[in-house]
Amino acid sequence: MKLLLVVLVFAALTYLAVRWLQDHGYGDQPARRRTPKPKPPTRPVAPDDDESFLRDLEWRRRQQERHKDQPQPPDAPDA
């Protein structure tokens, strides 16, 4: 049991030492900076998820209903 504890402590200290050396460089060499993971590209928003698209679609539908309910002026007779 004690041997396992010693091995775990040694492994943790070794890991931390290696990480510190990677971050701060070895001797005269500057540290290599780790590049951050690239962000996944943002996917386009589907029309049914876009609030402004849905609002505009509803506005157009209401405008069409209003124009349909209004009486149309009679066509002028052809001369």
Image (cartoon, grey):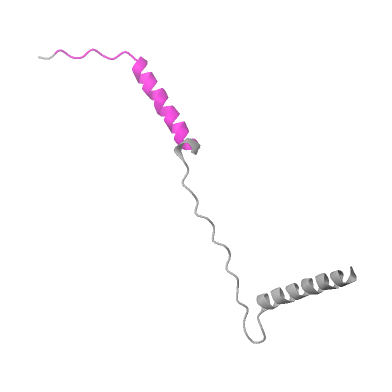
Q: Which of 6 and 35 is in front in this view?
A: 6
Locate residue 40, reporting x and y percent.
52, 55
Residue 54, percent from left and from top: 46, 33
Pick the residue in front: 62 or 1: 1
Q: In this view, does 46 lie to the left or right of 7?
A: left
Magenta span of residues = 51-77
What is the tally of numbered marks visible in this picture?
0
Q: Which residue lies furthest to the left in this view?
A: 79
Residue 21 versus residue 79 in the image, above or below = below
* Viewer-nearest residue: 11 or 55: 11
Q: In this view, does 60 lie to the left or right of 36?
A: left
Magenta-highlighted stretch: main secondary structure? helix
Residue sitting at x 46%, y 40%? 46
- The residue that appears at 58% across and 65% down in the rendered structure is 36
Residue projecting furthest to the bottom: 28
- In the depicted structure, whether residue 69 falls above or below residue 7: above
Which quadrant is home to the C terminus?
top left
Query: Magenta stretch containing residue 61, yes or no?
Result: yes
Q: Measuring 40% from the left and 25% from the top, which residue is drawn there?
A: 61
Q: Is residue 6 left or right of residue 22?
A: right
Residue 68 appears at what percent x and percent y?
Answer: 34, 18
Q: In this view, does 47 lie above or below 14?
A: above
Q: In which quarter of the image is residue 76?
A: top left
- Which quadrant is the N terminus positioned in? bottom right
Residue, far right: 2
